[in-house]
C-alpha cells in the first residue's frame, strides 16, 4: 500500500495531506500518532466516529482552504474543520463541475 | 355498477381489478423494476421466474443529472403505480444515483404494494434473485384481487401513440383513432395523447385549446423547461409540416384538459390530456403508462411490432405495405377498419383478450433522456 | 513472454471468446434480438439498446460506429444484424463494416421476415447455423501483446484508490511491458486529476485533446445547470467515503498504471493493437463506458469496484476486482480478484501480478463470475440534443 500508515488504523496517502483515511471503523476518542508526518502536532484525537474508508482532518483547515489527499487538492473546506473531525460532503465541497454556480451567475 | 355511476351497455362492459389506491386495472401484473441498468439482469431473472411478473429493463438510473435524473425517477414511480400493476418489486444495485429506497418510499405513499431488494445488501446477484422471487410471490399472495365491474368506457384511460406523422398515419389512421377517442371521451373516459412533437410544432394552436387551469400550468411547465431547446428531429419536422387539424386528429380536437410532463400521472377526471413525450414507441408507451393509461393504441407506419410490459397495445397502420408485411403483429389496417371495430377491440382487450403483441410476448420499455450521461 | 490461447481471426487479430453476436440496429429490433439470443444455443449473445429509428446525424453516426465496432470485435466469430426495415441507420454499412474484417455476417429484417414471431424463429435458425459454422475454430497460441485490455471502475469507494485501482494499474503496466494495449476512459473521472494525466501524455496533441475533452465533460454540469455532485460522486461512492469528484478522479486514474499516455480516441473508436496506454473519451456511466471500449476492440476487461458492481458484457469477459474486504466476503459470487489484501500488507506489485495472471487465464477461456451468471449488460451512450447544440453540431 502506498502512503503512510498511522498506528495501523489510518492511511495518509502523501505526507503533505491534510486528511487521512480510516482503515477500520474508528471510534470517537481514538488517538493516532501523526508526529512522523510533519504535522504541527504529535497526536490527533478523533472528535467523532469515522467509518471505514472515510476521512478525518489531521490539522485545522480554515473555511475556503484546500482539502488535500493524494498530495492534490480534492476540494475546499465549506466551514472550518478541526483536527480529528470527519471530513465529508457536510464540510468539504467540490470546486469542479459546479453548474449550479454557473446557473446562479447567469441568473444574478 | 360502474365506478362512475354509469351503467355500461352490455356489449361495451368489462370487468377489471380494483386497486386500493383507487384506480381500476385491466391486467394484474406484478412489475419487477430495476432502479438502474446494473440490476436489470437480476430483475429480468426474477420476472422470468414468476408467471404474473413483468420486468421493465432500461439503460438508466445512474450518472444522470438535474431534470434528466428527475424525469427518470418520476417515470419509475409512475410506471409502477399504473392501474394494471398489482404490486412492485424494486431491484437496486445499491450505489446508484436513483436509489431504490427512494422509489419504494414514493410507491408506498401511493398505496402500491411494494418490496425492495438490493444486490449489494443481499450479498450478490444470486441472493438478490432468490429474495426477489420470494418478495414477488409474497406480494401476489397478499394482493387482494378485488374484482371491479361491470365497467365501461367511462372507466377507461386510453393512451394514443401516433407520432410518425407519415401520410398514411395522418390520412387514415389518426382520424380513425380520433373517432374512437370521441366515443371514449363522450362516455366520460380519458384519453392520453403522446404529444411531444405536437407541442413543439403547434404550440400556439394547442395553447388556444387549453380548457383548464391545470392544462395552462402544465403547458407552461413543459414549454418553458430547458427540455424544449432540443434540435429538430425528423418526426418534429414532419409534424411542423402538417396542419394543426392533422396533428390534432387523434383526439378530434377535443378541449385539452391537462398537459403532463414526461413520467407524471394524470389527475383529470375525464377528457383529453397531452403527454410531453417524443413519438418513439417504447419511450411514448412508457410515458403513457406512467400517466395511467390502461391500454395504448399505437398508430405505426413503420410497423414496430413490440408491445409494452405494463400496457396492452393495439396496433393500427394506415400503410398497406406495412399491414401486409406485418399482419401477425398489427391488429388493424385503417383503410379497412370502422371505429366500431376499434372500440370493440379496446373493450375486448380490457376484458382480457390478448393483443397480438401480448400473444407473441415481445415488449419494449424505454425512457426518454434529456441530458447526457456523466 | 506471456502467452494464452485464443481464436485467430482472418484479419490476424485474436479473440478470447468465440461468440455469435445478435446485433439490433434500433430499439425496434432490440427485444427480438434478445429473444433470438435467449432461444439459440450457447455462445449466442445479444446487444440490446434503446437507440431510436431516427436519431439526429451525429448521434446516429455514434450508434453506427459502436454497432460496427461491436461486430468487428475479435471475440465475435459471426454476427447476425437484426433490424425493423425502416431505420435511417446505414444497415448495409454496418454489416459491410463487420464483414470487412472477415467475420461472417447475416442480416434479418423484421418486415421482410413477416413479423416478430417469424423473425425470432428465423433468427434462431440463422444464429444456430452461424454457431455451427464457427464451431470448428480452435484456440491457438497467442501473445499477450495482441490483447487490448479495457479497464473500468464502478461502484467505487475509498478502497478503490488505495487498493484495487493501483493493483489493476500494475497489471496494465505489465501488459504494456509485454507489448499490449491498455485502455481506460470515464472522462468525468479525470476532472481534478487531468493535470496529472496531462504530464504523462506522450505528445502535445494528446495533451491538448485530453484537456479539451475534460473541459467538455465538465461543461455538462453547466449545461444542466446543476452541481455535478448530484451524480458524481454517486450516493454509493459517498457512502464509501468519497467526498468530491476530484477525490474520486485522483483514485480512479491509478487504474491505468504509470505508462505514458499514447493517445485519446473517441467513444467506440478503434483502439490500436500493441498501442501501449490509450485513453477513450467516455462517460463515467459504467455500462456505456465498457461498451465503448469493447466497440473499440478490447477483448477483455477488468472492472474495479469497492461497493460491488455486478455488471458484465455480452462480448468481452469482465474481471471484477475489489479492494474492499467486506465486499469480497459478502459478494464472493460476483467478484473474481481480492485486492483488499493490500490493506493488510500484500504489496501492490504482488496483487498486480495476480490480476495479470487472471487476465491471461480468462483470455485462455476461464469464465469470469459475470460470465457464469449471465451478466451481460449493454447500453450505447447517446449524444443528447443538448450536447449536440452545445457542440454546434448540425442536426
Image: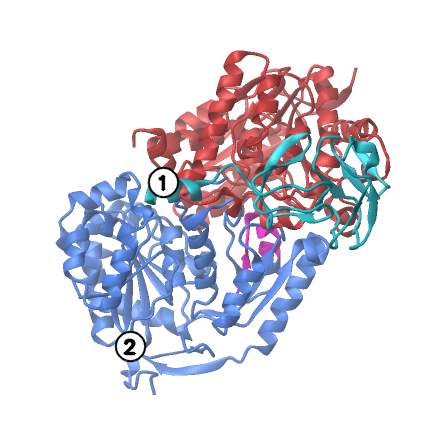
Furthest residue to the front?
Answer: A40
Q: Quadrant of residue B22?
A: bottom left
Residue B129 lies, with reference to residue B166, above or below; the image says below
The count of marks equals 2
Drawn side of residue B56 relative to residue A59, left or right: left
Q: Depth check: give the residue in front, C256 or C18.
A: C256
Left or right: where does residue B18 sit relative to residue B318?
right
Residue C367 in view (yes/no): yes
Magenta part of the protein: which range? B30-45
Q: Secondary structure at mark 2?
A: helix
Asked if residue C106 shows in the view, the reply is: no
* Chain B: colour as depicted: blue
Residue bearing the label numbered 2: B154
Chain letter for cyan, please.
A
Disc 1 crowd rating (10 Å Cα; few below 14, some 14-19, many 20+) is: many
Query: Is A90 above or below relative to C248?
Result: below
The quarter of the image holding the N terminus of chain B is bottom left
Determine which quarter of the picture holds residue C315: top right
Q: Which mark is residue C53?
A: 1
Query: Does B109 appear in magenta?
Result: no
Picture coordinates of residue C86, whole percent (x, y): 33, 39
Q: Is residue A16 above or below residue A31?
A: above
Amino acid at each position: 500500500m502506498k502512503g503512510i500508515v498511522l498506528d495501523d488504523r489510518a492511511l495518509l496517502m502523501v505526507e503533505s495531506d491534510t486528511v487521512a483515511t480510516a482503515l477500520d471503523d474508528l471510534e470517537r476518542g481514538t488517538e493516532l500518532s501523526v508526529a512522523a508526518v510533519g504535522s504541527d502536532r504529535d497526536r490527533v484525537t478523533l472528535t467523532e466516529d469515522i467509518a471505514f474508508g472515510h476521512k478525518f482532518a489531521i490539522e485545522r483547515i480554515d473555511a475556503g482552504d484546500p482539502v488535500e489527499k493524494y498530495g492534490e487538492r480534492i476540494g475546499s473546506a465549506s466551514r472550518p474543520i478541526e483536527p480529528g473531525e470527519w471530513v465529508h460532503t457536510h464540510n468539504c465541497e467540490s470546486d469542479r463541475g459546479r453548474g449550479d454556480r454557473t446557473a446562479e451567475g447567469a441568473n444574478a | 355498477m360502474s365506478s362512475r355511476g354509469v351503467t355500461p351497455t352490455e356489449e361495451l362492459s368489462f370487468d377489471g381489478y380494483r386497486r386500493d389506491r383507487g384506480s381500476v386495472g385491466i391486467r394484474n401484473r406484478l412489475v419487477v423494476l430495476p432502479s438502474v441498468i446494473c440490476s436489470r439482469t437480476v430483475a429480468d431473472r426474477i420476472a422470468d421466474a414468476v408467471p404474473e411478473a413483468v420486468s421493465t429493463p432500461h439503460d438508466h438510473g445512474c450518472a444522470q443529472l438535474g431534470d434528466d435524473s428527475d424525469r427518470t425517477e418520476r417515470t419509475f414511480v409512475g410506471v409502477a403505480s399504473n392501474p394494471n400493476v398489482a404490486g412492485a418489486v424494486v431491484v437496486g444495485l445499491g450505489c446508484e444515483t436513483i436509489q431504490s429506497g427512494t422509489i419504494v418510499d414514493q410507491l408506498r405513499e401511493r398505496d402500491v404494494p411494494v418490496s425492495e431488494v438490493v444486490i449489494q445488501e443481499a450479498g450478490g446477484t444470486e441472493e438478490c434473485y432468490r429474495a426477489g422471487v420470494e418478495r414477488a410471490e409474497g406480494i401476489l399472495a397478499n394482493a387482494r384481487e378485488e374484482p371491479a365491474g361491470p365497467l365501461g368506457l367511462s372507466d377507461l384511460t386510453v393512451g394514443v401513440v401516433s407520432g410518425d406523422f407519415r401520410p398514411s398515419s395522418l390520412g387514415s389512421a389518426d382520424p380513425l383513432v380520433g373517432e374512437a377517442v370521441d366515443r371514449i371521451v363522450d362516455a366520460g373516459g380519458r384519453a392520453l395523447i403522446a404529444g411531444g412533437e405536437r407541442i413543439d410544432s403547434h404550440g400556439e394552436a394547442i395553447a388556444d385549446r387549453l380548457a383548464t387551469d391545470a392544462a395552462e400550468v402544465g403547458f407552461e411547465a413543459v414549454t418553458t423547461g430547458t427540455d424544449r431547446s432540443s434540435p429538430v428531429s425528423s418526426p418534429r419536422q414532419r409534424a411542423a409540416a402538417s396542419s394543426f387539424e392533422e396533428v390534432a386528429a387523434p383526439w378530434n380536437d377535443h378541449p385539452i384538459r391537462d398537459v403532463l410532463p414526461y413520467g407524471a400521472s394524470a389527475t383529470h377526471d375525464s377528457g383529453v390530456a397531452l403527454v410531453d413525450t417524443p413519438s418513439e414507441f417504447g419511450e411514448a408507451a412508457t410515458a403513457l403508462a406512467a400517466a395511467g393509461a390502461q391500454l395504448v393504441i399505437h398508430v405505426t407506419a413503420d410497423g414496430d411490432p413490440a408491445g409494452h410490459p405494463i400496457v396492452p397495445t393495439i396496433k393500427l397502420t394506415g400503410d398497406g405495405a406495412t399491414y401486409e408485411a406485418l399482419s401477425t403483429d398489427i391488429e388493424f389496417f385503417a383503410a379497412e377498419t370502422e371505429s366500431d371495430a376499434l372500440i370493440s377491440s379496446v373493450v375486448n382487450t380490457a376484458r382480457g383478450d390478448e393483443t397480438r403483441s401480448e400473444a407473441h410476448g415481445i415488449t419494449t420499455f424505454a425512457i426518454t433522456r434529456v441530458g447526457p450521461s456523466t | 513472454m506471456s502467452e494464452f490461447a485464443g481464436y485467430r481471426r482472418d484479419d490476424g487479430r485474436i479473440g478470447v471468446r468465440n461468440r455469435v453476436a445478435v446485433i439490433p440496429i434500433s430499439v425496434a429490433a432490440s427485444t427480438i434480438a434478445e429473444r433470438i439470443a435467449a432461444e439459440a444455443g450457447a455462445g449466442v449473445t445479444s446487444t440490446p439498446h434503446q437507440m431510436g429509428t431516427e436519431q439526429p446525424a451525429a448521434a446516429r453516426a455514434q450508434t453506427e460506429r459502436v454497432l460496427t465496432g461491436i461486430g468487428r470485435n475479435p471475440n465475435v466469430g459471426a454476427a447476425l444484424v437484426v433490424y425493423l426495415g425502416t431505420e435511417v441507420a446505414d444497415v448495409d454499412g454496418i454489416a459491410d463494416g463487420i464483414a470487412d474484417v472477415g467475420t461472417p455476417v447475416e442480416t434479418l429484417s423484421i418486415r421482410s421476415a413477416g413479423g416478430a414471431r417469424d423473425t425470432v424463429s428465423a433468427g434462431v435458425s440463422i444464429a444456430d447455423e452461424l454457431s455451427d459454422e464457427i464451431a470448428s475454430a480452435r484456440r491457438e497460441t497467442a501473445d499477450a501483446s495482441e490483447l487490448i485490455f479495457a479497464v473500468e471502475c464502478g461502484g467505487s469507494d475509498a478502497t478503490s484508490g488505495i487498493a484495487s485501482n493501483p493493483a489493476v494499474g500494475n497489471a496494465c503496466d505489465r501488459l504494456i511491458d509485454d507489448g499490449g494495449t491498455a485502455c481506460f476512459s470515464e472522462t468525468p473521472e479525470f476532472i481534478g486529476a487531468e493535470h496529472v494525466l496531462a504530464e504523462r501524455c506522450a505528445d502535445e496533441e494528446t495533451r491538448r485533446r485530453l484537456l479539451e475533452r475534460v473541459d467538455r465533460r465538465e461543461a455538462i454540469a453547466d449545461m444542466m445547470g446543476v452541481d455535478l455532485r448530484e451524480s458524481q460522486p454517486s450516493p454509493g461512492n459517498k457512502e464509501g467515503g468519497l467526498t468530491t469528484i476530484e477525490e474520486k478522479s485522483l483514485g480512479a486514474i491509478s487504474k491505468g498504471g504509470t505508462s505514458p499516455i499514447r493517445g485519446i480516441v473517441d467513444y467506440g473508436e478503434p483502439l490500436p493493437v500493441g498501442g501501449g496506454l490509450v485513453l477513450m473519451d467516455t462517460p463515467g456511466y459504467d455500462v456505456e463506458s465498457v461498451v465503448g471500449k469493447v466497440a473499440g476492440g478490447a477483448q477483455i476487461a477488468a472492472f474495479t469496484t469497492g461497493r460491488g458492481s455486478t455488471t458484465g458484457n455480452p462480448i468481452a469477459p469482465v474481471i471484477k476486482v475489489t479492494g474492499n474486504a467486506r465486499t469480497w466476503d459478502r459478494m464472493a459470487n460476483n467478484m473474481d480478484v481480492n485486492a483488499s489484501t493490500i490493506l493488510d500488507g500484500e504489496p501492490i506489485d504482488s496483487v498486480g501480478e495476480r490480476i495479470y495472471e487472471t487476465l491471461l487465464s480468462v483470455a485462455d477461456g476461464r469464465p469470469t463470475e459475470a460470465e457464469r451468471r449471465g451478466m451481460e449488460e449493454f447500453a450505447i451512450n447517446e449524444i443528447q440534443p443538448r450536447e449536440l447544440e452545445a457542440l454546434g453540431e448540425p442536426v
